[in-house]
Amino acid sequence: MGTRWTPIEKAINQRYDDGDEMRIGRAFPMKNRNGRVTMSKKKSHKNSKERVLQKQAEERSRRMKNLIVGTLIGLLFIVGIVALVQSFSGDRNAGEQGVDEEIFDYDQQPVAGDPDAPVKIVEFGDFKCPSCKKFEEEIYPQLKKDFIDNEKIGFYFVNNQFLGPDSITAGIAGEAVYEQDPDAFWKFYDSIYKNQGLESEAWATPDFLADLAKKDVPGIDHKKLKKDIENETYSEEVQADKGIAEKAGVTSVPTLFINGKKVPGEKTFDYDYLKQRIEEELNRKK
């Protein structure tokens, strides 16, 4: 026997069978011969398959999103590490950018050691500067012992006199001594720092500087020296040195350059660092 329908069920199901049936089922469930409710096996299988496919698509989408997020986080991490390394490298090499050594005009500067040595160190200094005095007392003697006296390097001094008018006067005195006797300059260099007055006082007068040279710098014409200081004979040389300092980007004293590479300010008094840099340059020049 066929399925028995009530008149209302027949009317409604007939309407769906005429083209309005929704894919999710009829208005009333199907009944088998025993009157029990049944579902379409084909539709059940189809719906189950669609749900599986949907879940698989959702899982792929979730994995893709996780992959993209993970990749972005990884890239950001790598960029951060690279930036950190560059930062440390930048700190280590800060200020060590090379300049054209021709600007130092080596042939016109006082030099201790061998002017033809493969390593050249330039000190920019001010004779009134307390830190320059400290450098002359603590670092220069070690450089002299380890590298200058055995002529492994050439050590140059360039004026950067800016602490007052008498700084310039002291620079002129140094240039005047150098013009008379290049080797005598280093005796003046030692003496003026040993007898340095207060930074806040104008102590570097022509009389003081001439008397200092008479006491500690023998073998030069001291009358001519005093006259050259009073007449500012070598003021142009001091100003020329100032121009070199500006070209080299020098903003403080003492400032050192090793073969044209600026030594970071915080390393100026680190002799182990300076020694290592010098030895590296010596090995590189072999």
Image (cartoon, grey):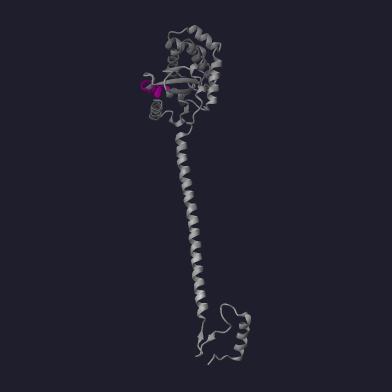
Viewer-proximal residue among 47 and 195: 47
Q: Which residue is farthest bottom?
A: 1
Name the main secondary structure of what is drawn in magenta: helix
Q: Which residues are magenta?
A: 136-146
The residue that appears at 48% across and 52% down in the rendered structure is 73
In the image, residue 87 sits, relative to residue 269, either above or below, namely: below
Q: Is residue 191 left or right of residue 17?
A: left
At which x and y percent is residue 110?
46, 17
- Residue 135 visible? The answer is yes
Viewer-proximal residue among 30 and 169: 30
At which x and y percent is residue 85?
45, 41
Viewer-proximal residue among 117 and 83: 117
Q: Is residue 4 left or right of residue 86?
A: right
The residue that appears at 43% across and 30% down in the rendered structure is 267
Q: Quadrant of residue 216?
A: top left
The residue that appears at 51% across and 65% down in the rendered structure is 57
User: Was residue 152 drawn as part of the magenta stretch in this picture?
Assistant: no
Quarter containing the C terminus: top left
- Residue 162 visible? The answer is no
At which x and y percent is residue 266?
45, 31
